[in-house]
Amino acid sequence: MNRSRVFRAFVGLILLFVAVGQYALTSRDALDESQRGLFTLRLGECFDAPEGTDVIGGVVQKSCSEVHQFEVFGFGELSERDNFAADEVAAEADAICVPEFERYVGVPATESKLALMHLSPTLASWESDDRLVTCLLFNPDGALRNSMIRSKV
């Protein structure tokens, strides 16, 4: 993976991490009809991050046959631990999502043109017993145009 792709993946991860953190502070009632909350995503669902809105926590659901930014490829539950440790949460989320990526796409993440990221609990959501990890894939070089299930891209 070249430096440009890594940088874009990192920026995307930061933006979605902020979105998850803000979601805990955003009322579900504030989402308009075209948006769904991050915690209502389903396996295989495609979506865009909302543009031109103050609502950070929602996503714009798209058909996977339409141009889209992200696709959900897996879920997992973090193990119980006494304290929230961001580095441990990230490592365990990686351990959940990396094998799921290969099962969903059909090639290992290290051999794919796609990138993966995960939505994982923030300190605030951890304290509310959130242990859900949502695994997402995206194309660091542009948009996705179809579902990536078994695409071997």
Image (cartoon, grey):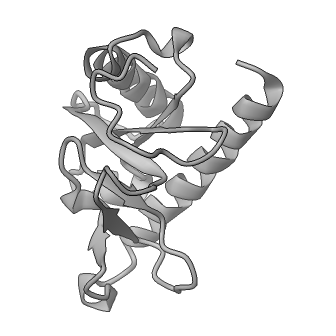
Question: Which residue ends up furthest to the right in the rendered image?
Answer: 3
Residue at the spot 35% in from the left edge and 32% down from the top edge: 148
Above or below: residue 105 compared with residue 77:
above
Q: How many numbered marks does the figure carry?
A: 0
Q: In the rendered view, does 115 fall on the left or right side of 1?
A: left
Instruction: Give the camera-side residue of 139 and 66.
Output: 66
Instruction: Give the camera-side residue of 141 and 119.
Output: 141
Above or below: residue 39 compared with residue 103:
below
Q: In the rendered view, does 51 fall on the left or right side of 36?
A: right
> Quadrant where the N terminus lies?
top right
**Residue 31, picture quadrant:** bottom left
x and y percentages locating residue 137 in the rendered image: 44, 37
Residue at the spot 28% in from the left edge and 31% down from the top edge: 81
Residue 120 in view in this figure: no
Residue at the spot 46% in from the left edge and 70% down from the top edge: 22
**Residue 29, picture quadrant:** bottom left
**Residue 62, picture quadrant:** bottom left
Above or below: residue 4 compared with residue 72:
above
x and y percentages locating residue 45 in the rendered image: 25, 50
x and y percentages locating residue 82 in the rendered image: 29, 35
Above or below: residue 39 compared with residue 22:
above
Instruction: Give the camera-side residue of 6 and 65.
Output: 65
Residue 61 in view in this figure: yes
Residue at the spot 23% in from the left edge and 55% down from the top edge: 41
